[in-house]
Image (cartoon, rainbow, N blue to C red):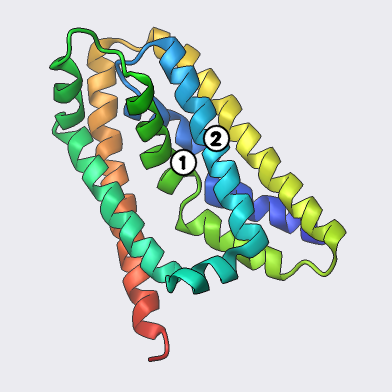
Amino acid sequence: MEFFLNAFATLFVTVDPIGLAPIFLAVTAGVSAETRARIATQSSVIALIVLMLFALAGNNVLGLLGVSIPAFRVAGGLLLFWTAFEMVFERRQQRKEATAEKVLDHSESANLAVFPLAIPLISGPGSISASVLLATQTQSFVALAGLLGLIFLVIAMVYAVFRIAERLDRYISETARMVLTRLLGVLLSAMAVQFIADGIRSLANMPA
């Protein structure tokens, strides 16, 4: 029981479902309610698959690809910083306004669900590392199954928060949305820099 409590706390903190709500609103600004719901579902499912995959075979997958968690952290940080840059300077919004309607098609919404929502915001280096490390602590199939159940629970919480965020978006004015997008873009850039710094620090400490 102590292991499951610690595992849930670790996953909840690293995924941070509540903290993802305003970021989800900013990233999906200007899309229809139907598209936002589809993005919420797709990103949650993709993140769930990623975290369960790494929990089941994380070390083997990374070893097969020759990729370390620190390297993944640096790469994710760089990609996240580009997204933050676009949010701060309205590059994403300008691209959407270039179309006749501010509605994403299925391919575009799928791309948005994969990056940056599913990876690296939901299933980022922190939560992937946590899944791998927690899986190595399981001593039986029952414990591993319980860990997978906890991952499912945390991702279900993320999905619920995303759907609530969609309702809250109806009460946010255009000016407030612009301010929120820029503010969260700055916060995302800080998160990205932290990802990169942590990854570089870990790479520097790795044996040659």
Q: Position of residue 83 (x, y in %)?
A: 25, 41
Of 32 and 165, nearer the camera is 32
In screen coordinates, is 128 left or right of 75? right
Residue 1 in view (yes/no): no
Residue denoted by label 1: 118
Q: Position of residue 16 (x, y in %)?
A: 53, 43
Q: Position of residue 143 (x, y in %)?
A: 82, 59
In screen coordinates, is 131 left or right of 122? right
In screen coordinates, is 133 left or right of 174? right
Image quarter of residue 155 = top right
Image quarter of residue 144 = bottom right
Q: Is there CB contact under 8 Å for labels 1 and 2? A: yes
Of 88 and 66, nearer the camera is 66
**Element under label 1?**
helix
**Element under label 2?**
helix
Q: Residue at x 72, y 50 (%)?
A: 148
Residue denoted by label 2: 44
Q: Residue at x 16, y 16 (%)?
A: 97
Residue 181 in view (yes/no): yes
Give the quarter of the figure containing the N terminus.
Answer: bottom right
Amino acid type of the residue that numbered disc 1 sits on in the rendered structure: Ala
Mark carried by residue 19: none
**Considering only vertical position in the picture, is 197 above or below 147?**
below
**Considering only vertical position in the picture, is 4 above or below 153?**
below
Which sits earlier in the primary sequence, circle 1 or circle 2?
2
Amino acid type of the residue that numbered disc 2 sits on in the rendered structure: Ser
Image quarter of residue 17 = top right
> Circle 1: is it few (<14), some (14-19), or many (20+) Cα within 10 Å?
many
Give the quarter of the figure containing the C terminus.
Answer: bottom left
**Considering only vertical position in the picture, is 151 above or below 86?**
below
Q: Position of residue 130 (x, y in %)?
A: 59, 60
- How many numbered circles does the render carry? 2
